[in-house]
Image (spheres, coloured by chain):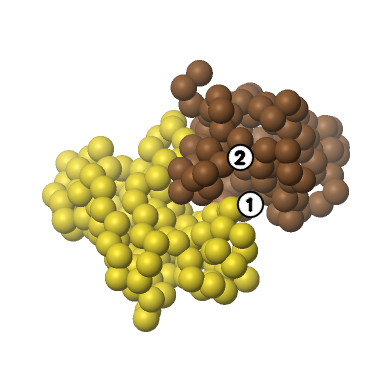
Amino acid sequence: GDSVTQMEGPVTLSEEAFLTINCTYTATGYPSLFWYVQYPGEGLQLLLKATKADDKGSNKGFEATYRKETTSFHLEKGSVQVSDSAVYFCALSDPTGGGNKLTFGTGTQLKVEL
Amino acid sequence: GAGVSQSPSNKVTEKGKDVELRCDPISGHTALYWYRQSLGQGLEFLIYFQGNSAPDKSGLPSDRFSAERTGGSVSTLTIQRTQQEDSAVYLCASSLENYRVEKLFFGSGTQLSVL
């Protein structure tokens, strides 16, 4: 079945540091890939997405590139801020499964300190 | 309201009791999802409602779990004879039919603790 594996947290960084959160996937078909973010006390919200190989999703300074050859979708940001502290979830939607549900990773907590 | 609303935000219950969790989706959203987030686990799909179609119940972990959606809007997730392993955050999400998972909006969840 479909699965998503992401690096365990928590990840603790100083402000302005470079961020990478690794995500790899297995899927039956050709999935769409997503990063969701959950800020403290809030619901999950879509951060960025990519729907085909070599697509780069980007939002709020975050980027992730769909790499079919390595089945990866790593999240990066060049300079993190304290306000980026949250839990980040990698997810996929597989069209062979109907495309109507998301398969999530376990989430990675990010803490950014001054 | 503007977003997906879930109630209660926290629920503590005793093993063996039944619980009901409520979800109010965004007005006009025809698709509604329930997910479960257990400690150290990813979000686990439970059930999906789409309009008047039969729900996709493939993620429900046992027959103690059931869900209904009345009038195509509010949904209730019921867990009968709760067990300690049911302790988790239960998340509801909704989307417009046309967007499917592309535009899922999540509620803040119900933290269920089974003692």
Q: Which circle marks residue B92 in the picture?
A: none
Please give the chain letter of the residue carrying mark 2: B
Q: CA distance from mark 2 to mark 1?
A: 14 Å
Which numbered disc, 2 or 1, marks the residue closer to the eye? 2
Q: Which residue is mark 2?
A: B31
Please give the chain letter of the residue carrying mark 1: B
Query: Residue type at mark 1?
Result: Phe
Palette colour of chain A:
yellow
Q: Position of residue B16 (x, y in %)?
A: 85, 37
- Left or right, B79 with reference to B51: right
Q: Position of residue B50 (x, y in %)?
A: 66, 42
Q: Nearer the viewer, residue A88 or A110?
A: A88
Q: Nearer the viewer, residue A107 or B26?
A: B26
Query: Helix, strand or loop at disc 1?
Result: strand
Up the image or down, A45 lies above or below B17; here it is below
Q: Which residue is mark 1?
A: B45
Q: Earlier in the sequence, mark 2 or mark 1?
A: 2
Q: Quadrant of the N terminus of chain A?
A: bottom right
